[in-house]
Image (cartoon, rainbow, N blue to C red):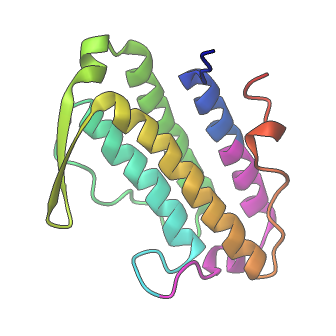
Amino acid sequence: MSLSLSIDELIGYTNGERAKWEAWFQEHPPSALDAPVQREGDFSDVWRLMHHIFRVEKRHTQRLKQESPLMEQIGVARHDVTALFAFGRTVREELTGFIHSASQADLNRTLEVSYRNQVTKFTARKLVFHIFVHEIRHWAQIATAVRNAGFPPPGLHDLLFSDAME
């Protein structure tokens, strides 16, 4: 038996999660964005981790589209939730456009990325799926961080409770 999850179902699931979080952050005080995520590292608080989610999606989309140089800063002021999620929607439209127009050859193309003095090679197809898994992992971290800071996260986040697929 073969099971599959379509890319459109995965896009639908993550878009739904983004909408849930955007509405939630609009309704909560800015201190929720300052909730600590990790003691050390680049993502000390929720704001930095959300910024990371959208910035990485942009940079990976640029890699998929063979654009350079890669974006360094997204130009959104700290705590401007509206602008951050608007940026995220724009990037998601770019990514979705690439996905729906990519040929099999485009998806089988090998990419090479240097990160922390290590070179990694993978297909464009793998990078597309990585973008979504990367985001899902980080939203789970954000849910834990806001809960630990005394803010119950918004609703149910499991795929089971999503309308992205039957």
24 falls in the magenta region:
yes
User: Which secondary structure type mostly characterizes the magenta part of the structure?
Assistant: helix
Where residue 164 sits, quadrant-wise, is: top right
Q: Nearer the viewer, residue 41 or 74?
A: 41
155 falls in the magenta region:
no
Q: Residue at x 37, y 45 (%)?
A: 58
Task: Please give left or right for residue 112 compared with residue 99 in the image.
Answer: left
Task: Please give left or right for residue 5 compared with residue 150 in the image.
Answer: left
Quadrant the C terminus occupies: top right
Q: Position of residue 65 (x, y in %)?
A: 26, 29
Q: Nearer the viewer, residue 111 or 60?
A: 111
Q: Nearer the viewer, residue 34 or 112?
A: 112
Q: Residue at x 59, y 21 (%)?
A: 4
Q: Position of residue 61 (x, y in %)?
A: 34, 37
Where residue 24 sits, quadrant-wise, is: bottom right
Q: Is residue 88 visible?
A: yes
Q: Is residue 109 above or below residue 90?
A: above
Q: Position of residue 137 (x, y in %)?
A: 56, 56
Q: Is residue 138 above or below residue 149?
A: above
Q: Which residues are magenta?
A: 17-39
Task: Please give left or right for residue 114 compared with residue 4 in the image.
Answer: left
Q: Residue at x 57, y 78 (%)?
A: 37
Q: Is residue 78 visible?
A: no
Q: Is residue 47 above or below residue 118?
A: below
Q: Residue at x 81, y 74 (%)?
A: 151
Q: Position of residue 31 (x, y in %)?
A: 70, 80
- Looking at the rendered structure, the number of numbered marks drawn on it comes to 0
